[in-house]
Image (cartoon, rainbow, N blue to C red):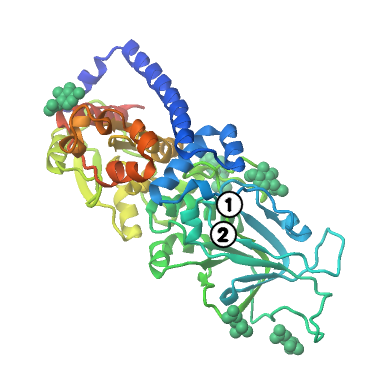
């Protein structure tokens, strides 16, 4: 079928039908929010006070982070610690740290601050500027500088650092100052963060580390040193270009570091948005500059020297072929009829590239930026849409049971990045689970009930780990046509 005939078929849906569809989508989505909320509460039992509070503030966000956290790890929600401020929290730390952000704890320390990596200690040497000076040391405090607070699995993989406020007036019994001398003095500010947690998962690398790092460091115009804990060598390699674009200095790996690094100013932990893949801090930026997600993606295009700002814009009898990237997954949630899908896309006029997300991000960023449509199964590989040109189309294939995650982890952020999104929700008979369960089995007919009755630990292996998809290409065609239609819109 040629392109024009195809477009005609799509257009033959009346405006009214489309509107009805839209309303229905909205209603069913709202219902889903409510039922998911109820369901998770039933499943998880009473939630910690802080989480409940957060829930009533913004059900969606917490829902997502709860589901997401459970998707990525096996953290038990019941052991979450409340995010309330401890009584012992020292007066001095109170002025420099914020522990009430639901995503991360962070401190901004000005004055004389000394980082001793090998002992995981940050000495705050300068006297308090505001508080009344006392001869006593403020109580020390522990911080884990990774932006997925409340997720035990992530935080369990994040090093705990000790903040030691120190009053220079106090001396040890021997009369010496109980503070290490500086062995390395830095003139520019430092930002200390962890690349532990879920680092390695592309989605989390961006949502938990890269975007928060951008938001917290961009205003410093590369005059900042990054101090990283829990860092693996491959992480540094993966984000080399990006880190270089944010800082002109080499990254300092503080683990097992024998130096005492002294800074005039240090940010510990990264303030982060409560939404996924978002720069939106909801409170005013302390630096007077706030960054939009558009600023972030345009920063990426410049950092990776990506050529295309905007996707192809087709006119009616355009002979150019839009490029479609099909992101493949091998182990879980794979396409079992990749060839058929590719052939279908080609027959509709796409120039198709099919590949797994590459390890070499510099190279893959360029591949992604060269396409107009990204097609992929729900999963971390989709995060690469950050490199797409604006107005490109993301086609997310949504396996059974994963609608919620698909929407909030990928669709919502992609829309915020000036991309267009299409979701292809599979029918039960397109899932490989269809071969494993009778047609009327709740696994196929009612995934939510599986979550509520059997819990996440049974839901996850079924829907996320053991589900592949055989796309019904004749049904999928309309989604591919819709993407073409979008590339024709002005
Ligand atoms: C701490 O963070 C919370 C949540 O982001 C914010 O509402 C509050 O204003 C912050 N407090 C300070 C002292 O910055
Ligand atoms: C950390 O290194 C300093 C300087 O080499 C040393 O004095 C200190 O004992 C070390 N601390 C730990 C916990 O290894
Ligand atoms: C720091 O340096 C001073 C002067 O060089 C020395 O007296 C002191 O013992 C040193 N302190 C420590 C903790 O090494
Ligand atoms: C962010 O993007 C907006 C809109 O394109 C632009 O006006 C603004 O200058 C950008 N901000 C920064 C700090 O780059
Ligand atoms: C798959 O299920 C859909 C909807 O239930 C149905 O319309 C379609 O015919 C089925 N396909 C096959 C190959 O059975």
- Depth order, front residue of 284/202: 202
Image point 58% across, 43% down: which residue? 48
How many neighbours does mark 2 have within 10 angstroms: few (below 14), some (14-19), or many (20 or more)?
A: many
Q: Is residue 19 above or below residue 263?
A: above
User: Which of the two labelled residues, at mark 1 and mark 2, occupies the earlier sequence position?
Assistant: 1
Circle 2 sits on which residue? 145
Residue 482 position, x and y percent, is 27, 27
Q: Which image quarter: residue 417?
A: top left
Give me the C-alpha separation between circle 1 and circle 2: 7 Å
Left or right of 400? Residue 455 is right
Residue 210 position, x and y percent, is 48, 55
Residue 157: image tag: none
SS at mark 2?
Answer: loop
Q: Are marks 1 and 2 in contact (CB under 8 Å)?
A: yes
Q: Which image quarter: residue 487?
A: top left
- Depth order, front residue of 397/247: 397
Q: Residue 6, can we see it? A: no
Image point 67% across, 58% down: which residue? 108
SS at mark 1?
Answer: loop
Circle 1 sits on which residue? 104
Q: Give the quarter of the figure containing the N terminus.
A: top left
Image point 74% across, 58% down: which residue? 88
Disc 1, ligand 1: is the CB inside 8 Å?
no
Q: Is residue 490 above or below residue 464?
A: above
Disc 2, ligand 1: is the CB inside 8 Å?
no
């Amino acid at each position: 079928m040629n392109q024009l005939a195809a477009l005609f078929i799509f257009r033959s849906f009346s405006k009214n039908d489309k509107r009805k569809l839209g309303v229905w989508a909205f209603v069913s989505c709202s219902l889903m929010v409510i039922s998911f909320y109820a369901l998770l509460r039933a499943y998880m039992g009473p939630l910690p006070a802080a989480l409940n509070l957060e829930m009533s503030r913004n059900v969606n966000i917490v829902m997502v982070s709860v589901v997401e956290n459970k998707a990525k790890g096996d953290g038990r929600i019941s052991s979450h610690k409340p995010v309330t401020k401890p009584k012992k929290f020292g007066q001095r730390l109170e002025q420099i740290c914020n522990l009430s952000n639901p995503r991360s704890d962070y401190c901004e320390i000005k004055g004389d601050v000394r980082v001793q990596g090998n002992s995981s200690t940050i000495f705050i040497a300068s006297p308090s500027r505001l508080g009344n000076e006392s001869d006593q040391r403020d109580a020390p405090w522990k911080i884990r500088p990774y932006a997925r607070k409340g997720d035990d699995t992530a935080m369990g993989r994040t090093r705990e650092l000790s903040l030691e406020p120190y009053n220079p007036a106090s001396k040890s019994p021997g009369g010496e100052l109980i503070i290490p001398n500086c062995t390395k003095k830095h003139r520019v500010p430092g930002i200390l963060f962890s690349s532990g947690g879920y680092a390695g998962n592309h989605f989390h690398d961006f949502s938990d580390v890269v975007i928060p790092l951008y938001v917290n460091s961009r205003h410093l115009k590369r005059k900042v040193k990054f101090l990283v804990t829990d860092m693996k060598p491959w992480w540094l390699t993966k984000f080399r270009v990006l880190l270089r674009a944010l800082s002109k200095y080499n990254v300092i790996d503080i683990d097992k570091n024998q130096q005492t690094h002294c800074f005039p100013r240090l940010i510990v932990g990264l303030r982060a948005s409560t939404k996924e893949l978002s720069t939106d801090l909801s409170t005013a930026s302390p630096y007077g500059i706030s960054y939009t997600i558009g600023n972030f993606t345009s920063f990426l295009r410049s950092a990776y020297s990506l050529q295309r700002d905007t996707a192809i814009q087709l006119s009616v009898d355009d002979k150019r072929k839009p490029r479609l990237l099909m992101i493949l997954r091998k182990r879980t949630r794979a396409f079992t009829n990749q060839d058929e899908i590719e052939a279908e896309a080609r027959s509709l006029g796409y120039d198709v590239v099919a590949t797994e997300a590459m390890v070499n991000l510099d190279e893959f960023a360029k591949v992604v930026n060269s396409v107009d449509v990204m097609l992929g199964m729900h999963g971390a590989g989709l995060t690469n849409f950050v490199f797409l040109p604006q107005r490109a189309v993301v086609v997310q294939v949504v396996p059974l049971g994963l609608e919620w995650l698909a929407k909030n982890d990928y669709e919502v952020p992609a829309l915020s990045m000036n991309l267009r999104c299409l979701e292809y929700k599979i029918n039960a008979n397109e899932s490989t689970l269809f071969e494993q369960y009778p047609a009327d089995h709740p696994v196929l007919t009612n995934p939510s009930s599986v979550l509520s009755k059997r819990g996440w630990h049974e839901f996850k292996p079924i829907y996320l780990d053991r589900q592949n998809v055989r796309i019904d290409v004749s049904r999928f065609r309309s989604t591919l046509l819709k993407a073409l239609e979008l590339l024709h819109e002005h």
